Amino acid sequence: MFMVKDEFENIKNLVRVKVKVNRKNFMWFFAIAAFMHLTSIAATIFSVLNDAGVRHYTRQDFSVSFFFGLVIALIVMMFLYRQTNNYLSVFPQTNNSRFISSQIISYIIVIFVGLTALMLHLVSYCVISLMSLSVENVHLALGFDFGFIVVGFLSFLAYGFLIVAVIDLVGVILRKWTIFGVAAILAIASLVFATNTATVREIVPRALAFLVKEQSFGLFFAKAMVIWIVVAAVSLVINKRTVYYKSGNAISGNKIVIACVAAVSVVIIGLWLFTFNTASPDGGGSVNVSAANEVDDFLSEFYSQAHEIRIDVSHLPRGSDIHLTGENIEIIAGGAAAITGSRNAVANISGTSALESIQGDTVIIRFRPPYYYVNGVDMTKYANPHINAYLTGDTIHLEYSVRDAAVVILPIWGFARQFDGYRDKGLVTGNLLGFSSGGGMNAHGYIDVE
């Protein structure tokens, strides 16, 4: 038989002991994670209450950062496998019970980390939600969906369990075939160094596309569980046929392995981090009325979907000049600071030559609102940019305003963005890691006369 009856009892006892031994580590992790998360939220609340204008507060997706930290912790645990077994050698155990109990502890850690990330997110979400109800112009950019929360948590567990299985497989290979294992890892590291980053970014996602690009959660979970079972089973078979503690030189050999694999891990993680993109364009300036431009095909297309403001000027004689509030005329401009907080929102008005010697009965101002996004979140819809125009005598006055808006982005379960059922529903940010932004707070208007 693969396992005897006593081994089940050994596994249960070893798991109980390892949980007890690691209890302080669990508590420290939770305390540090809670402190970091709540400090971040407290800083956000302070800024929201003291800042003005259109601004965003992008919180980190702790489920993603916790996941990468989890990977590093599991790698360290793999190299401490022998030391941990020596520490607990007073307890009855076999090769199987040692290995399976270690795997169970790893799975418990994955579940604990996932629950911690979820709990901290829910606390933060509740705090900001209550704040948005009591403080004007505070908005939560991402919605809340119970189904997405469940799917995201299960996705985190699936990826976590796969990582545990793969790391354990690497561990048993290194313990059984140390020299060959190190040689293989160094070969892979050399290949990574020899390949440019763009190629790595293409090859890795393509190789993992059957899993990380799977759009159906059901198929993804089924694939993940099958791979997990197969990898875990292979690890168990290899471990059962491995004899440990054969020589006194094992510890020094493991130090070499630890150094080699740690270096490779740093390189691989660094390559992933290098793929993050950051772009932060200019946010805009004060109200401005530009010089006239003639209508051309580009402008026609640019303003084809713009909002129109029509002003009746039929009572003015043909050939009259209509003045526009501008350099030497009063500009009625209200509103708050732009997203950057450094300057006021911009309204660029062109086509003013049409107001000279008018030959029509209606002045048309085609207004195209600004567009600015942060991590895929459209900021301007919260700012409610608005332009108003009215005629007094022979002068058109423009009013352009932007409402104050504090937009808080609280992402969770970024790994679940791949599923069709939750895509384009305002539940995740535009990118998994890093920061991206684009557009600008400049509004554009074009004047024509009919």
Image: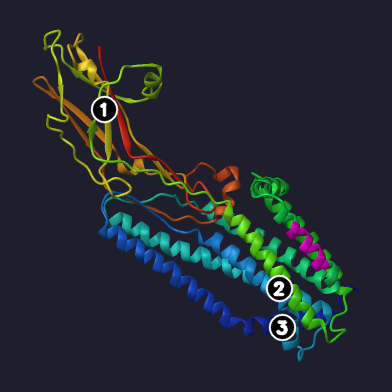
In percent of the image, x 70 and y 45: which residue is there?
A: 206
* 375 lies above or below 99: above
The image position of residue 100, as x and y in percent, is 77, 74
Residue at 56 percent of width and 65 percent of height: 66
Image position of 171 with respect to 322: above or below: below
Considering depth in this image, is 36 or 104 the residue closer to the camera? Answer: 36
Span colored in magenta: 181-190
Picture quadrant where residue 372 is located: top left
| Residue that numbered label 1 is attached to | 349
Q: Which mark is nearer the camera, 2 or 3?
A: 2
- Label 3 or label 1, whichever comes before in sequence order: 3
Q: Which residue is mark 2?
A: 259
Kind of residue at disc 3: Thr
How dense is the environment of label 2, judged by Cα within 10 Å: few (below 14), some, or many (20 and up)? few
Picture quadrant of residue 338:
top left
Q: Taken as a whole, is the magenta stretch helix, strand or loop?
A: helix
Q: Which residue is mark 3?
A: 84
Q: CA distance from mark 2 to mark 3?
A: 19 Å
